[in-house]
């Protein structure tokens, strides 16, 4: 059940219910500007779409729709998409997560302008049976576009490698991959999305006990 697509869609739906929250964000004006700037190209997905997704639905995100997370403490805006891919004898789980930031840049003439920049990290379960793939372990990789040449992240360099490095992550299942992605945005002090998942684990009797234990492990480590 820790790698069951329906479990993941339930957890993402819980996050989607809170995706318009600024959380404990201190720089709310910057966060609001960032949300508005990316909302057209990276529209928020409704929690109903995720709640209604079945175990057989391996990719419930419509094109150009994303789950928005609360801003980080510096006003960075995280968004993500999640999917499973059928391999020969297993499923590969992926979270494509990006962070958008607002920055001021000065050109050669001394003129300052506000720009938006984005960079992406893909969190993945093993891509092949152990020993049969270079990436047969849980790992993270960079990316500059959510899909090949589609929805490129603003200001992200095109040369950014998206195959290597494949950085090992502390995960053993799809639930871990999700929690690892969330913690990467907020660190240990303010990971409110992890606490939302913990609240759901406490009150939702349909959620698998193993999934509850895995979520609790991540929350207790924050």
Image (cartoon, rainbow, N blue to C red):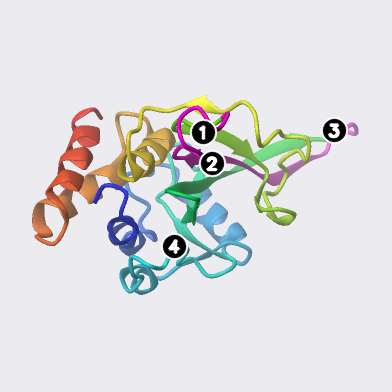
Front-lying residue, 92 or 184: 92
Residue 15 picture quarter: bottom left
CA neighbours of label 3 inside 10 A, class few (<14), some (14 to 19), many (20+): few
Q: Is residue 82 visible?
A: no
- Relative placement, left or right, of 118 versus 213 is right
Q: Kindly identify the residue that appears in the image at 13 percent across and 59 percent down.
A: 204
N-terminal of the pair, mark 3 or mark 2, is 3
- Relative placement, left or right, of 106 versus 221 is right
Q: Kindly identify the residue that appears in the image at 58 percent across and 68 percent down.
A: 63
Q: Is residue 30 above or below residue 20?
A: above
Give the labeled residue for mark 1: 140
Pointer 4 with pointer 2, Cβ within 8 A: no
Which mark, residue 124? none
Which mark, residue 110? 3
x and y, in percent, of residue 80 in the image: 49, 52
Span highlighted in magenta in the image: 108-134
**In terms of secondary structure, where does tag 4 sit?**
loop
CA neighbours of label 1 inside 10 A, class few (<14), some (14 to 19), many (20+): many
Give the labeled residue for mark 4: 58
The number of numbered badges drawn on the structure is: 4
Give the labeled residue for mark 2: 122
- Relative placement, left or right, of 140 versus 52 is right
Q: CA distance from mark 3 to mark 4?
A: 50 Å
Q: Is residue 117 above or below residue 38?
A: above
Front-lying residue, 186 or 180: 180
x and y, in percent, of residue 186 in the image: 38, 35
């Amino acid at each position: 059940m820790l790698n069951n697509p329906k479990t993941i869609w339930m957890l993402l739906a819980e996050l989607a219910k809170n995706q318009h929250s600024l959380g404990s964000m201190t720089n709310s004006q910057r966060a609001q500007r960032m949300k508005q700037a990316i909302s057209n190209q990276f529209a928020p997905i409704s929690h109903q779409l995720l709640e209604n997704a079945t175990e057989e639905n391996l990719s419930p995100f419509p094109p150009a729709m994303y789950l928005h997370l609360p801003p980080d403490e510096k006003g960075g805006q995280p968004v993500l998409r999640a999917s499973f891919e059928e391999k020969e004898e297993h499923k590969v789980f992926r979270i494509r997560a990006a962070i958008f930031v607002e920055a001021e840049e000065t050109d050669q003439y001394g003129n300052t302008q506000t720009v938006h920049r984005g960079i992406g990290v893909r969190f993945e379960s093993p891509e092949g049976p152990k020993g049969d793939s270079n990436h047969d372990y849980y790992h993270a990789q960079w990316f500059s576009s959510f899909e090949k040449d589609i929805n490129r992240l603003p200001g992200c360099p095109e040369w950014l490698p998206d195959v290597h490095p494949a950085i090992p992550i502390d995960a053993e299942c799809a639930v871990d991959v999700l929690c690892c992605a969330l913690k990467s945005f907020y660190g240990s002090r303010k990971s409110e999305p992890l606490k939302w998942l913990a609240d759901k684990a406490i009150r939702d009797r349909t959620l698998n006990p193993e999934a509850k234990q895995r979520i609790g492990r991540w929350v207790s480590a924050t």
